[in-house]
Image (cartoon, coloured by chain):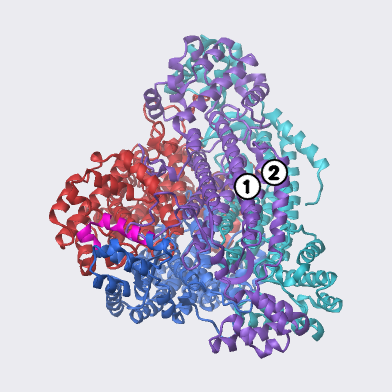
Chain colours: A purple, B cyan, C red, D blue
Amino acid sequence: MGSRITDSALYGHLWGTDELRAIFDEPARIGSWLNILAVLARAQAEVGLVPEAAASAIAAHANVELLNLDLVQEEIRTSGHSTLGLIRGLQEVLPPEAQEWVYYGATVQDLTDTWTALVMKQVGAIVWRDLRLIEEVLLDLTERHRDTLMAGRTHGQLASPITFGYKAAGWADEVRRHLHRLREIAARCLVGQLGGGAGSLAFFGDRGLDLRNRFCALLGLNDPVISWTSSRDRVTEFVHLLALVASTLARIGNEVYELQRPEIGELREPAGAGSVGSITMPHKRNPEMSEHLVTLGRLVRSSAGVILEGTVQEHERDGRAWKAEWVAFPEVCLLTGTALQFAHRILAGLEVDQSAMRRNLTGWEVSEKVLSFLAPDVGKHIAQALLQQALAEGGEKGLSVRRSLATSDVIRAHLDPKILESILDGADPGESPQMADEVVARARKQRVTEPELWP
Amino acid sequence: MGSRITDSALYGHLWGTDELRAIFDEPARIGSWLNILAVLARAQAEVGLVPEAAASAIAAHANVELLNLDLVQEEIRTSGHSTLGLIRGLQEVLPPEAQEWVYYGATVQDLTDTWTALVMKQVGAIVWRDLRLIEEVLLDLTERHRDTLMAGRTHGQLASPITFGYKAAGWADEVRRHLHRLREIAARCLVGQLGGGAGSLAFFGDRGLDLRNRFCALLGLNDPVISWTSSRDRVTEFVHLLALVASTLARIGNEVYELQRPEIGELREPAGAGSVGSITMPHKRNPEMSEHLVTLGRLVRSSAGVILEGTVQEHERDGRAWKAEWVAFPEVCLLTGTALQFAHRILAGLEVDQSAMRRNLTGWEVSEKVLSFLAPDVGKHIAQALLQQALAEGGEKGLSVRRSLATSDVIRAHLDPKILESILDGADPGESPQMADEVVARARKQRVTEPELWP
Amino acid sequence: MGSRITDSALYGHLWGTDELRAIFDEPARIGSWLNILAVLARAQAEVGLVPEAAASAIAAHANVELLNLDLVQEEIRTSGHSTLGLIRGLQEVLPPEAQEWVYYGATVQDLTDTWTALVMKQVGAIVWRDLRLIEEVLLDLTERHRDTLMAGRTHGQLASPITFGYKAAGWADEVRRHLHRLREIAARCLVGQLGGGAGSLAFFGDRGLDLRNRFCALLGLNDPVISWTSSRDRVTEFVHLLALVASTLARIGNEVYELQRPEIGELREPAGAGSVGSITMPHKRNPEMSEHLVTLGRLVRSSAGVILEGTVQEHERDGRAWKAEWVAFPEVCLLTGTALQFAHRILAGLEVDQSAMRRNLTGWEVSEKVLSFLAPDVGKHIAQALLQQALAEGGEKGLSVRRSLATSDVIRAHLDPKILESILDGADPGESPQMADEVVARARKQRVTEPELWP
Amino acid sequence: MGSRITDSALYGHLWGTDELRAIFDEPARIGSWLNILAVLARAQAEVGLVPEAAASAIAAHANVELLNLDLVQEEIRTSGHSTLGLIRGLQEVLPPEAQEWVYYGATVQDLTDTWTALVMKQVGAIVWRDLRLIEEVLLDLTERHRDTLMAGRTHGQLASPITFGYKAAGWADEVRRHLHRLREIAARCLVGQLGGGAGSLAFFGDRGLDLRNRFCALLGLNDPVISWTSSRDRVTEFVHLLALVASTLARIGNEVYELQRPEIGELREPAGAGSVGSITMPHKRNPEMSEHLVTLGRLVRSSAGVILEGTVQEHERDGRAWKAEWVAFPEVCLLTGTALQFAHRILAGLEVDQSAMRRNLTGWEVSEKVLSFLAPDVGKHIAQALLQQALAEGGEKGLSVRRSLATSDVIRAHLDPKILESILDGADPGESPQMADEVVARARKQRVTEPELWP
């Protein structure tokens, strides 16, 4: 075992957090399954299907530490059945009078889908918490850098100026939308499953609906109204949201990666004490964590694609799509959760080099402003032509942008020299600060009224 | 031109509907862009940036039929700029005093993103309407077949009985969840874009925020608060929902495809008059439309993947991801909309062969029921072993399932012969009808109170 | 650790084989890395860069069991560097005079890419061997069932007859093409990496090219001519081939799944002793392994997509794409290798129910043949219309296909009753057996001359 | 019609070339189908299945310009059959004695798969030609810039120096591997299809195999040995290669995009006369074509994924996967072909700013070299620590890298000042030029002996 680098002793910290591993590790998963079996027996006792004593005995023994996992493993392999090994393992430790009441009338998906819902509850809570922590950092960055001028960049080229607060506000706003989404989907995702063989509840006679209701209530899940064994939009919706979250974080990571280039030097992810950039080239400081957000984003998207494909299921259960979910769903959760931690670390320690930001405003950024001053009188499209001409003429003389414009006859013919000078001296971020303000104000207001815990 | 089979004269009906084509066809797209330019000028006039007369002239001439499209095309190719051709084309037909006020301070994405929002509004309305039409058909199928017995199937094998109404209700419930989702995302998706060069609104001096507000209001869109040029979660969220919708329809189509197999014969998609299954094999009746839902689902998922990947954008505009959206976003809309039409046609004319459904209940379906009667006394896991034994013994003698159980000593030792007989005579769909009822009741209630039009 | 179900103690056998795990397990991977370091030192000693004694000491201590893995792990986390921990761990166990000569001038990718090439060599050999084993089984099935009549199926509907040998031959031919592909790509994939910092070999002065040559030769790999740190087509090509292989196996698995439906019943995957289909429904025999081939195919495709995306790397090393390869590349190998084992097991024990195949030839299959007899005289398109008419008329009277044709006046008017009768009595698989023969003959011939071991 | 921007009059040049459109445009596709029908009749005449006169008449009338396409379209929609409309359209223009011999015994895939093979032949030839043209440009760039020093970059950070010729050689080598691949796959891809209903050739009696052989030979295709209607690895292999090609071009495009950043300024894609970077910001020169290579790469990968998914087909024909191929396969060809043209234009006019490359060698690049001189005496890992220390100390004093090293006592203690000076003065690209030389030499040699035309 242990052939996945994602669970490697050496590299596992790149692909999971302790908190998430505590949900998905095999003992935890088995433990959760056992707990579901115990709750099922309890609910069955309540509706009169299972003797009270049996339910209590099951609850008392549904503990992964009591089980002989070698036996469980052996039975799984022999039977080729997904849960039979577990059941036999549990039966073995139960008193005889309870043995027959385990997994009473349930089918594998009753167990695994309900587990999935419970996991969505735990993971959703983590995502909610971490997104809010990240939002807090982003709002703080936004405020601190409300007026920190930097070049906007489009197509990788220098464009009109913005402020770094504006950039951070764009991230924060995206994060806030994810928070809204997470609240909206909760009721649809946190839903139990209980149906037996083909989902009809037939095994339970006329107590099926009551039983399902109790079962879900005891687990803190919603009742599904109808079995959803091959209706996977609930899971897919959750995964889609996590993929969106991971993509936002990848976008932030990629931005840091690019702006940390030494030729740009505007941002730098924090370097831990003892961190080593390169062995061969001791000078280097690689944006390892920022890169990693992009990596995680790719892997999450890939697994999300498996989940979406799996929505096209056949009949009342389709093992072909369902088993792929076994692998892809936890992967999405583990990697997105890891990305949230990395992103928080990067943003909380982000080094913002304001002087580099200033330095990269090399004059190009004034053209939109000059244009806006020329346009009303000269006409915008004509102004544009004038500007192109001035810059071309200056360029031929080897002049800088500012110098080209300052000395251009065609420009000076239409623009008061004083105004021109003031434009060339400054960099106008337009309404960047105001937009940032509004993002912050709105978010802060919502943070106060919304619950700290999800759902 | 015309190299895509999706726009083929002969096969185009498989990959688009007239209604959707009327949104995405080039003249319509250009027309919508021109309208956005006219609204921009109007809003600019209202906030005092553009002369009233210019705005009126632009509105009067922003008509695709007035434009010299050859010139537009030529300019696009020469300039390598996405919208310059269009602007020059429009300028050419404008009176001189208006020519300079076109596209005043705007950037390409102000045009294309706002167009995308307007398109989401139109497409969302179609999806809403068609999902509700499909839901209506599904609810009707659910009610009519509330008690129509059929085999449940898991892993492609016969399982416990369900009713066809239960199956249809599962589809209906998925559709209803999509309707809820569509309502939730409206406010986030239907948002305009206006920012100029790098999104800062700097060109518009201190009137930027007012201008954007007016611009959005005139178009019936929400104000974005902050520019979202490289923040694509709004579009991705819409696309994700359409991909979920298309996957649901693919699931339905696939189910019809499988159940239309002659060896099963439970469902048949409607055959049009004059339809020909196969030339070589004249007997055939292919589930062409049902298959096509699966095909469309695959293509939608693929384009949705491009959109999700595009969420990881760089800086304030990233042409690498953005241009891919130009192709993938309309594709998702066109194909999902087509799938909705096909699905409606299939479901509205669906042939349900109740006798075939009955015929396929060949005895296997009773085992869960027998088990449920044996379990309370014998113990469930022991009962299961007994059942296995009885079926194995019967099988060796060449007996049918029912016969094996009816004549099995081990079964008869634990089950009253009368009860056994009644189980073997019937097929118990459990709570399938009740679950179907509740799905219908809930949906009907919501249909009454929700708006007929989206958003 | 252990949060991936793919490495689960209970379910890991579904997602890996012992043989492949022995390649990818962490100790094995670390061991292979250490061996590469030892070979590097050896090659460096040979070209005079490293003292002979140091190289020997490194070789003697490059053993994962000597290392303090806790220290290695700690250093990896502190340094944030991918291999520094390993190096420090190795240094610790080396005699002082060798400590400085470890990882001399190498960079991470020199280690990991060379490891990837070595892994491709091992995995390729397994794929080669297993594909040939599967081919052997398929050729045998083809021969045994050369004349086993069964229905062809198109669009899920019954079509003209084929033989099961023809179907198996189609699979075999696909497998053979994979074998050809595997031989072709070997030279491009089995290539070492050595370049240092940015791939220039500068660290090694004028001995760089010699060193790389020796290094590769000692490892049994080809020299790359130029560093390929960000040129990932070699790896992608290998992965693409494995994805094709996994897709072929998924196609076979899916076919078994469909033909194992009880309503069809033509194929059945082997059931192990003790295997349990369903707990709730004791009668069931699920095609679990066949389904699983489809599942594995999906997951392989998904990871292959990550690798293909990773081909678009930036500069001389791009951590964003490269680290994703760390996860996705082993996944493709592990899952494809598992699929090969499952496929072999399914095919080697495949139950072919010839009588069910016969039974499903319910008359529809004769139409192409009748058509071919009518066509020369009547005209093919007219014949087709006659056939449609005859079948429609028979259908209205409730007649079977054979009966409809046998009693149809329009058919009998154009076809000698004896010929008609002989067509209706038989099912003509056309050249299916001959095509199968040729596939077998060609494959057997190639199997004799090709090497048993790859590459 | 015309709702896809890929076929837009205004933007279509971004998503197709005239040459490729001449293959995929509807009239061309229909024309090719008609030609296949004519060849089929011809081959059938040769083996005695169809009257000679009928075959000649079909050949004479199999011309798209003779057809009433409105009728064809109408029939396609009424019949729901993929080719029936075309056949009826062709029959209508044929003399009565030929009408019945059209499409004699063929099925849709006989037509469409054979067409796909013919298209692969045409597209493969274009890819071969354009890859060789691009290789020529790359070899030339490699030679011209064999010694043009520039910074290597890893993780977006400055690394040891390389030469631009080395970078170009890495691209060239990747292109050469694609050329090898293209030659290898030809025999497997260029294969006809003829089988009738379920692929068995039954319609053609005992002349089936001969007929198929003649049919393929007349079309210049290989005989497939066995029908491959649901065996799509041939098409997928071709698509995989094109996806690799498109990814290589995307990698090149992305590299230009990044190195064209004004802060780096080392490369610039050619600007056409009249090209306009930005309207709002007249100074801008966007790397539009380079970006577009990345965009095209994404879309190609996405469609390639659809093709790979389609490899898992069911039975003897599977409309669900097959129809998706109708869309995705041409898309891959059209977009990859377009990318080849763009890439050639970018590379042929690429502006290489050698002084900017020099300027970006700001000192960091010497560290690996200093390390390599210190290592033999001091020990590599100790040398590394010294270097880190020297740079840290220099950094604190605000010294540049070169200055830090030049004045560092710890460095000077171990390195002869003259040697140190010479290292600091230069930038050593190691064996970059030699590796580039070998790539060029090998490619040139192969270019001479290989055919100019593919296959």
Is residue A399 depicted above or below A33 in this figure?
below
Q: For residue B437, what is the image quadrant?
A: top right
- For mark 1, does the 10 Å Cα neighbourhood hold few (<14), some (14 to 19), or many (20 or more) residues? some
The kind of residue tagged 1 is Glu
Q: Position of residue C141 (x, y in %)?
A: 33, 44
Which sits in the foreground, D122 or A10?
A10
Q: Position of residue B163 (x, y in %)?
A: 65, 32
Which sits in the foreground, A54 or B129?
A54
Residue located beneath label 2 in the image: A447
Q: In screen coordinates, is D443 left or right of B276?
A: left
Is residue C80 depicted above or below D2 in this figure?
above
Q: Is residue A276 visible?
A: yes
Which sits earlier in the primary sequence, circle 1 or circle 2?
1
Checking the image for residue A136, the label placed there is: 1
Q: CA distance from mark 1 to mark 2?
A: 9 Å
Q: Position of residue D100 (x, y in %)?
A: 55, 67
Q: Magenta includes A436?
A: no
Q: Residue furthest left?
A: C53
Is residue B397 depicted above or below B452 in this figure?
above
- For mark 2, does the 10 Å Cα neighbourhood hold few (<14), some (14 to 19), or many (20 or more) residues? some
> Secondary structure beneath disc 2?
helix
Q: Magenta includes D387?
A: yes
- Dominant secondary structure (helix, strand or loop) of the stretch shown in magenta: helix
Checking the image for residue C22, the label placed there is: none
Which sits in the foreground, B16 or B353?
B16
Q: For residue A197, what is the image quadrant?
A: top right
Q: In screen coordinates, is A282 left or right of B64?
A: left
Q: Is residue D103 visible?
A: no
The kind of residue tagged 2 is Arg
Query: Are the residues at dot 1 and dot 2 in contact (C-beta closer than 8 Å)?
Result: yes
Q: Which residues are magenta?
A: D374-392
Q: Position of residue C10 (x, y in %)?
A: 40, 31
